[in-house]
Image (spheres, helix red, strand yellow):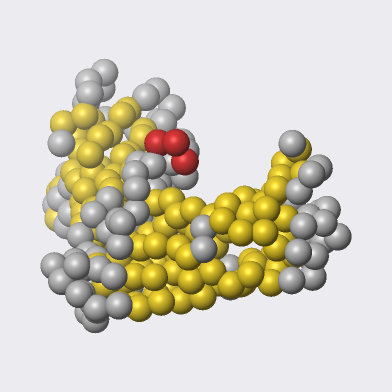
Amino acid sequence: AAMVDQQEMSRLWLEPDGLEIPVRPGAFNTSIVSITNHGAEPVDVIGHLQKLEFSLTGDFVPEADRGELPEWITLNPETFTIQPGRTQRVRITLRPPADTFGGYYGDLVFQGRTETVTTEVGSNLLVFVGTDIERSATVQFTEIRKEDNATHFDCLVLNEGNYHLDAAVDFALRQVIPEHVDEETGRIFARRTETMHMVNLPAGGNPILPGTERLIRFSVPLALGAGEYEAIVRVDYGGPEPAMDGIGMIFDEGEDIDD
């Protein structure tokens, strides 16, 4: 069967397109999604839940490589047929154990089949267990690679909280001008820095899920000569204060980086 967009042929629609369901540890909660068949044929539907996962670089992990959502998140019904013009309501039920806390992230997916086509519709799912959202993150430079005409900086952001983070990242590379004395006048010039390159990555990409890391890479298209440099990275994620890291470098002619 051919895969088609939900707006074509089967006209299968899911509402809402995103769910955020709170529940207390050891308690019970439910929510409802509605699937409507706007097409002219009956549609056989199979629903399932899948865990939402991102790779280290922030790409979606293929469905076959993802883990499972906990068994206390269930759908009812999972299979059904929707006649033309009719709507099916599906209940999501949450029964977290008493020792469960934090955010759980998944996709709610429904695959519909008619005699001629197959289509999928889905909704994002966030289940938050507990009452206190904790936003906490760290960032650290992990690798620097110097080439003839560029220098590459790798940073790892770790979400140490219990809620997803939508992070904005700022990076700056500065050259350090050390304290020196003018030989003619004897004037002492204090140590200072000059910004050579800046990058601003706005929030809005795929979120960093609790307990996971995100690799962020910066490439500076400059040939850095011998001298002293410093790099700064700042991550604003909605917490009480931004996460920051800095690193100093000394480049000698023909030599690698000295951190």
At x 20% / y 75%, what residue is drawn? 26
Q: Quadrant of residue 258?
A: top left
Percent x, y for residue 251?
23, 30
Query: Could you say which quadrant of the image residue 37 lies in?
Result: bottom right
Residue 15's place in the image compared with 2, above or below, is: below
State the residue lying farthest toward the right. Answer: 40
Locate residue 165 relative to residue 5 in the image: left or right: left
Locate residue 171, reporting x and y percent: 36, 53
Q: Quadrant of the C terminus?
A: top left
Q: Judge by depth and name the residue closer to the eye, 213 or 20.
A: 20
Residue at point 82% right, 61% down? Answer: 39
Using residue 206 as the reference point, say whether residue 5 is left or right of it: right
* Direction from residue 66 to residue 241 in the image, left or right: left
Pick out the residue farthest to the bottom. Answer: 131
Location of the N terminus by quadrant is top right
Residue at x-position 32% and y-position 28%: 146
Q: Is residue 230 visible?
A: no
